[in-house]
Image (cartoon, rainbow, N blue to C red):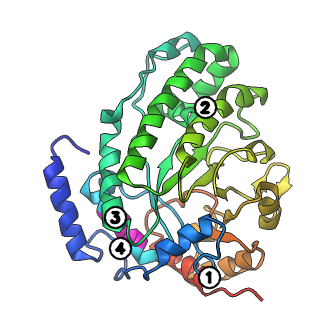
Amino acid sequence: MNDAISRRSFVGALGLLAAAGSPGSGGAPGPAAKPPAGKRQAMLAFAGGGAGPGYVPAAFFLHFDPASRLGPGAVQRHLEYFRFTGMDFLKVQYERNYPPLPQIKAPADWKEMPRYGLDFYRPQLEVVDALVKAAGREAVVVVTLYSAFMCAGHATSRELLVRHLELDAEAVRPALERITDSLLGFVRECRNLGVDGFYASTQGGEASTFRDPALFARYVIPCDLRLMGEATTGAAFSILHVCDYEAPYAELSPFVGYPGQVISCSTHLTTGQRSLKELARLFGRPIMGGMDRKGVIASGGEAEIRREAEAVLKASPERFILGADCTVPGENRWPGIRAAIDTAHGFRRG
């Protein structure tokens, strides 16, 4: 949050949002319908292995416009989007990337990586706090959580991070551990604010990232498991996202031991297509996804989106959440996303 916005004005703006109860200006098409009573309880039951809401749940995610990423604008936009699309839980987008550190030029320079305290995360935490207060009684609220590997890449670049790990991983390891310590503080504070869980992303295990995949196993996975272990401890609703935003994976077996009650991943691997039912058997947990974020959900009309969603649903396992394989590009896809979610909600298995 900009320093010019005081916490008092932030809370005041939240009160106005709660009183309004419907989308304001800024491109949200049409009125927002308040979610039906019981949606929160149904999704908590689903995560716990129960029957769930009695239909196929669905949720899609996107980044909002720059003015709606932190502060009251972020709270308003999240609520507008959640209520307009009818999605089955509210995911808080993470928009507090690590600042660039141009002084890191060689592996030894990773000693310059600071350990950020809660003050750094405060703008994001204020959005989390406001959304839990505004929607936590009607919806499950989960917070996006980036891995230490991802945050290190934000501070330099993914390419530089990988090169330094390949040159001298032991010099980089303390920085990844320091970032993990920092993120653990963020996780604990989110839990104190009342979130139900996290949408925890992992990267670095893609087929093309490391020339020696053992580097991922030795230096990235331990930080992932430490962070995600804390994030899932006591969580009522947790999602592991195996993120292929940067590149596809050759296999997903390295992630079978990761925690998470729901698994979000792509069916497209470098070694071939995997069915949603195959993925459900591999992980032994509900799968979320099925639709290509760069496909019709990103560019097609509502009728086309409904047809693809229907095809995905027919091929899905019994316990399934319809979604995209990652963040949907663009910010103007609300009606199409609502069409996909409506299709999931109306789908009945034969």
Q: Which residue is mark 3?
A: 77
Q: Position of residue 109 (x, y in %)?
A: 51, 12
Type of amino acid under label 3: Arg
Residue 261 appears left or right of 59 = right
Nearer the observer, disc 3 or disc 4?
A: 3
Q: Which structural element holds mark 4? A: loop
Q: Which structural element holds mark 3? A: helix
Q: Which residue is at the far top?
A: 108
Type of amino acid under label 2: Cys
| Magenta segment | 76-82
Q: Quadrant of the C terminus?
A: bottom right
Do the residues under discs 3 and 4 have CB atoms within 8 angstroms?
yes
Q: Is residue 223 above or below residue 71?
A: above
Label 4 Cα neighbours within 10 Å, binned few <14 / some 14-19 / many ≥20: many
Do the residues under discs 3 and 1 have CB atoms within 8 angstroms?
no
Residue 63 appears left or right of 126 = right
Q: Is residue 342 above or below residue 128?
A: below
- Which is more N-terminal, label 2 or label 4? 4
Residue 95 at least partly seen: no
Label 1 Cα neighbours within 10 Å, binned few <14 / some 14-19 / many ≥20: some
Q: Is residue 20 above or below residue 120?
A: below
Q: Which structural element holds mark 1? A: loop
Type of amino acid under label 1: Tyr
Q: Label 4 to label 1, Cα distance in Å? A: 26 Å
Q: Label 2 to label 3, Cα distance in Å? A: 32 Å
Query: Along the line of sight, which residue is nearer the eye, 338 or 41?
Result: 41
Type of amino acid under label 4: Ala
- Which is more N-terminal, label 3 or label 2? 3
Please tell me in which quadrant of the rendered image residue 227 appears: top right
Label 3 Cα neighbours within 10 Å, binned few <14 / some 14-19 / many ≥20: many
Nearer the observer, disc 4 or disc 1?
A: 1
